[in-house]
Image (cartoon, grey):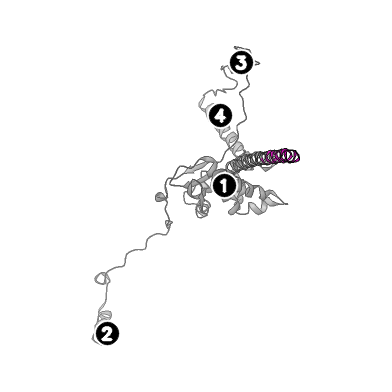
């Protein structure tokens, strides 16, 4: 009877031990799956964050924003910009000459950059006031804009960067105000010219045109068919002008010279000689 009692106790202890072991394996399996799931989620998030184009754009943006730290950064990071750029009259008088040094100097400031979309060769076009570049592949504006960020930092011309989605408020480029001033001046000139010609100018904002509101028929609060007024007027942000000049094979490596060709050398038979010079040349040949 004692043996039977001992066997029963032993069986109960073994069953309890087996249950504990099984519970331990279940907890271990649950913990492993939870950890693996968390790691998988973390890896997916890191892959999204480290997308090559996004990483490249954010890197150049951070580099550009760092130029605003500290005092008097404008004079440092705009040191290469000629003061004539900030005067409409002086700038216009310079660029009227097709071979002016202002444009030529910026065409010599070249940046060759490797991007996730391919290699880019960029310079600043002082006449078109934009970033000209060569590339063999199509490159979206966001990536070209990131190359422009690096360009203005490397060549100390930060004010050339006009994109208001990147630099806004107190970081806006002063050239945006100069462009608006130039547009107003051109508009005033056209109005004066039209008045002199006897033509009446029509202002679209004030003229006989109705400004219509936009409506949306999307359901609101679960009620289908309600008409809701939607204000579609959004602010327009200035962007950088980017000019694609074609593939790398279109690039001119050697700059053309502005020097005039010298007159061709005359042949010996075309040089007039007197008798004295002729005899001296003959004696020299004999010796």
Of the numbered discs 2 and 1, the one sitting upstream in the chain is: 1
Rendered image: mark on residue 143: none
Circles 4 and 2 in contact, beta carbons < 8 Å: no
Distance of label 4 from label 2 (alpha carbons): 80 Å
Q: Is residue 216 magenta?
A: no
Question: Residue at (28%, 80%) from the top-left corner?
Answer: 277
Q: Position of residue 258 (x, y in %)?
A: 43, 57
Nearer to me, 100 or 58: 58
Q: Main secondary structure of the magenta part?
A: helix
Find the magenta span and give its range: 1-21
Q: Is residue 254 above or below residue 137?
A: below
Circle nearer the N terminus (3, 2): 3
Q: CA distance from mark 3 to mark 2?
A: 108 Å
Q: Are marks 3 and 2 in contact (CB under 8 Å)?
A: no
x then y, percent, for residue 215: 59, 17
Residue located 67% across and 52% down the image: 75
Q: Which residue bears the numbered disc 1?
A: 56
**Residue 191, labelled with which disc?**
4
Image quadrant in which the C terminus is located:
bottom left
Residue indicated by mark 2 = 284
The alpha-carbon separation of the residues under discs 1 and 3 comes to 41 Å
Mark 3, residue position: 219
Please name which of the two marks, 2 or 1, marks the residue nearer to the observer.
1
């Amino acid at each position: 009877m004692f043996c039977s009692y001992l066997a029963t106790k032993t069986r109960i202890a073994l069953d309890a031990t087996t249950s504990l072991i099984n519970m331990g394996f279940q907890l271990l399996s649950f913990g492993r799956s939870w950890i693996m799931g968390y790691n998988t989620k973390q890896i997916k998030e890191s892959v999204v964050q480290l997308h090559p184009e996004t990483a490249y754009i954010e890197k150049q943006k951070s580099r550009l924003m760092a130029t605003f730290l500290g005092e008097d950064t404008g004079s440092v990071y705009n040191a290469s910009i000629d003061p004539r750029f900030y005067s409409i009259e002086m700038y216009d008088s310079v660029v009227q000459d097709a071979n002016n040094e202002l444009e030529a100097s910026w065409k010599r400031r070249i940046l060759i950059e490797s991007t996730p979309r391919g290699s880019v060769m960029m310079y600043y076009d002082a006449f078109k006031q934009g970033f000209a570049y060569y590339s063999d592949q199509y490159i979206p504006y966001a990536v070209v804009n990131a190359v422009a960020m690096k360009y203005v930092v490397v060549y100390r011309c930060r004010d050339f960067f006009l994109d208001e989605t990147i630099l806004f408020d107190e970081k806006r480029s002063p050239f945006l105000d100069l462009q608006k001033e130039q547009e107003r001046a051109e508009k005033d000139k056209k109005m004066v010219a039209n008045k002199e010609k006897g033509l009446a100018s029509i202002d679209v904002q004030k003229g006989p045109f109705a400004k219509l509101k936009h409506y949306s028929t999307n359901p609101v609060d679960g009620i289908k068919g309600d008409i809701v007024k939607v204000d579609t007027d959004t602010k327009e942000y200035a962007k950088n002008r980017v000019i694609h000049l074609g593939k790398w094979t279109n690039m001119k490596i050697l700059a053309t010279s502005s020097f005039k060709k010298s007159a061709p050398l005359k042949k010996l038979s075309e040089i007039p000689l007197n008798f004295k010079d002729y005899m001296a040349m003959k004696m020299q040949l004999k010796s």
